[in-house]
Image (cartoon, rainbow, N blue to C red):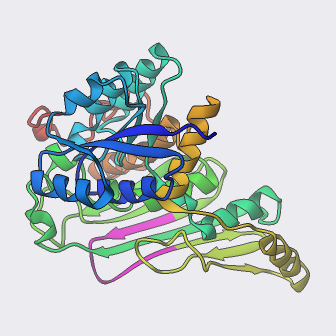
Amino acid sequence: MTRKLRVGVIGAGIAARHLTGFSWNKDLFEVPVLCSLDEDRGRALCDEFGIAEYTQDADSLFARDDLDIIDISTPPSSHFELCRKGIVSGKHVICEKPLFGSIAEVDEMGGILARFPGRKLMPIFQYRYGSGLQKLKLLIEQGLAGKPFLTTIETHWWRGPDYYAVPWRGKWTTELGGGLLGHAIHAHDMLNYVHGPCAEVFSYGATLVNPIEVEDTAALSVRMQNGSLATLSMTLGSRKEISRLRFCFSDLVAESILEPYTMGRDPWVFTAGTEEHQARIDAALAAYVPGEDGYTRQFELFHKAIVEDTEPPVTLQDARNSLELVTAAYFSQRTGQPTPMPIAADHPLYRSWLPEEQRGAGSL
């Protein structure tokens, strides 16, 4: 019989999508308690998903011995401390993006996990599990893609004044960054998921759309460690919202759909250079067996990792790769110079990418 894992959820915003993912995995998970400071939203989620207990005391979840997992779906500035408490209390942890507020915190969490063997922390990057992107991964694994040349990624969304009416948004000390960190990070993780880590970035960033502290528009040029190049653009000022990913290899081009929030899903288009190679690609894709995607698939794989004591499907290193790109982009914007990666302990932004005047001003 499959072992059910018991989850305590902290948050009542994006947590709703997590709860949907758990509900699609009813044989793997149950959620007996939800914690949120927003009582109206918290109790509404409890009613919607049949959660027996509501609380505003997060520490009570860490103290319980009947929970296997703490799911953290709170504003970014609270992530590190909640993750630390979860691991130290003997729980596994799921945490929404962006994971933490610095590369130093990622490395510190690595040290914490080393002291608590068997505990697993999984950052959220659910976009990876769309069938379109998974088909590209399959073609690469079967040697049908060839040498990588160029990737272009567009995250062109709309966020107006109502979005930033939420007090913690648009501020360095609570949101920790702008569109690069909170919006394009999923698409940029897909870049790393396909090609591996970045090697260098040159970035322009600007605040053009809303009167906020953080960037809402950016353009990046990236050199990957595998030798390929990438161009990444992000704006929260696009009245027509799209996300677009295009991967150019020597033997095929892979193009995503344009739907802004599910761009990893089918139908992707895979175009080869010859009829013979197109037939090989089509045969490989015909053998692909679709399954669940998004949070549902990521949670399913996390359950497997816990039960079999293997690595989570998304690792701390995956989160580090994504945050290194953000850190390097902010450094490039401020210096006007290309910024190499990885980001080591001697880098000026290793402990924080917040502007100097903002460091220590919040409750990180």
Residue 306 vertical placement versus 245 (above, below)? above
Quarter of the image containing the N terminus?
Answer: top right
Q: Position of residue 62 (x, y in %)?
A: 28, 26
Which residue is pictured at 62% across the width and 70% down the height? 132
Which residue is pictured at 20% across the width and 50% down the height? 175
User: Among all residues in the image, which is located at the extreme right?
Assistant: 276
Q: Position of residue 278 (x, y in %)?
A: 83, 80
Apparent side of residue 243 relative to residue 10 in the rendered image (left or right): right
Q: Is residue 196 visible?
A: yes
Which residue is pictured at 53% across the width and 70% down the height? 152
Residue 121 vertical placement versus 241 (above, below)? above
Q: Position of residue 122 (x, y in %)?
A: 46, 39
- The answer to which image quadrant residue 79 occupies is top left
Q: Position of residue 61 (x, y in %)?
A: 26, 30
Per the image, is 239 magenta? yes
Which residue is pictured at 36% across the width and 49% down the height? 97
Q: Nearer the viewer, residue 355 or 337?
A: 355
Apparent side of residue 249 relative to residue 211 in the rendered image (left or right): right
Per the image, is 362 magenta? no
Instruction: Report the predominant secondary structure element of the magenta stretch.
Output: strand
Q: Is residue 188 visible?
A: no
Residue 252 vertical placement versus 229 (above, below)? below
Residue stretch in magenta: 231-244
Quarter of the image containing the C terminus?
Answer: top left
